[in-house]
Amino acid sequence: MIVGHAVRRGSVQAHMMIRMRRLLALLVLVIAVGVTAVVLAVQQGGAVHPVSGRVIAGVMGHQGAPWLDRGEREQEERPSLAIRELQLRPGMVVADFGAGSGYYTERLAREVGSSGKVLAVDLQPEMLALVGARARTLGLANVELVRSTQDDPRLPTGGVDLILMVDVYHELAEPQRVLRRMKAALSPRGRIAILEFRKEDPRVPIRAEHKMSVQQAVQEFDAEGYLLDRRVDSLPWQHLLLFRVR
Ligand SMILES: C[S@@+](CC[C@H](N)C(=O)[O-])C[C@H]1O[C@@H](n2cnc3c(N)ncnc32)[C@H](O)[C@@H]1O
């Protein structure tokens, strides 16, 4: 009896040890997953630009596409005025870099006409699918879709007259590499235009890491060999800055 009891007690203890080990393993796994998630979140949005010290924002997910097409956008940002300031002409080749849902692509395609072309570039296939559907619905045959990577804009060499980034540059994970590669894509008189929410203006209701100052933009473009060619300050919330290769 005594022996039998001791054996049973031993087996209960062994069983408890196994359960304890399993619990410990589970705890370690939960902590590891939690730490990885935090590290990933920081890597995605928290890198710092080495020249300006600006905190690089995370990429806006395709789930946010309806915000890009909101009805109030014309009144809040005056995109029609921004397009006019780009001084586009029929026949031009324009890249809508970081095209999102294609809000600007549609407007650019109308400006450059059937003799011109708009390259709608984005990282996210879901965004490109939205642009493709929009172009088909509107019968815009001059829109071409391009899937980029974080460090390669995948633009054709030498023939792009304007690369437009609307609310995009501040979230490029590799801004230096992208700007260097864009040089090769520009035509001889080509320009890069960026539209960014004004960091200098606290009344602009956008999160801090999604805004940029003129000083930050000029400093970062200058470091990659670009000159500020023109600056437009008439938009309600954004700067429009046009750069050319120095
Ligand atoms: C805030 S949305 C702006 C979309 C559009 N320009 C507009 O104003 O309606 C930013 C877009 O840039 C894209 N993006 C971010 N980094 C990119 C990169 N390295 N190459 C191409 N697209 C990028 C995102 O996928 C997203 O669609």
Image (spheres, rainbow, N blue to C red):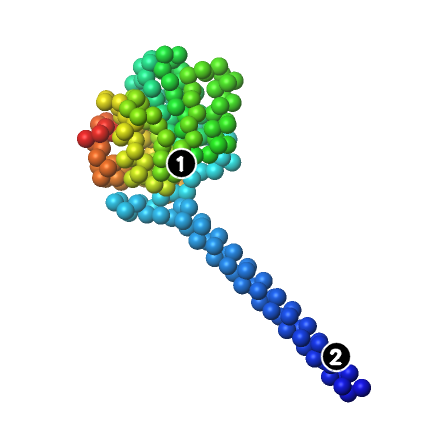
Assess disc 2: are there few (<14), some (14-19) or many (≥20) residues with their C-alpha within 10 Å of its C-alpha.
Answer: few
What residue is pinned by disc 1? 149
Q: Position of residue 124 (x, y in %)?
A: 46, 34
Q: Residue at x 35, y 48 (%)?
A: 47
Disc 2 element: helix
Q: Residue at x 38, y 48 (%)?
A: 46
| Quadrant in which the C terminus appears | top left
**Residue 224 appears in which quarter of the rendering?**
top left
Q: Residue at x 34, y 41 (%)?
A: 174
| Outermost residue to the right | 1
Disc 1 element: loop
Question: Does any portion of residue 197 appear in the rendered image?
Answer: no
Above or below residue 138? Residue 18 is: below
Q: Position of residue 42 (x, y in %)?
A: 41, 50
Q: Amino acid at mark 2?
A: Arg
Q: Position of residue 104 (x, y in %)?
A: 41, 24
What residue is pinned by disc 2? 8
Mark 2–mark 1 Cα distance, whole angstroms, equals 62 Å
Name the foreground residue: 228 vs 191: 191
Q: Amino acid at mark 1?
A: Thr
Above or below residue 88? Residue 34 is: below
Mark 2 or mark 1: name the one nearer the start of the chain: 2
Q: Disc 1, ligand 1: is the CB inside 8 Å?
A: yes
Q: Which mark is residue 65?
A: none
**Residue 166 appears in which quarter of the rendering?**
top left
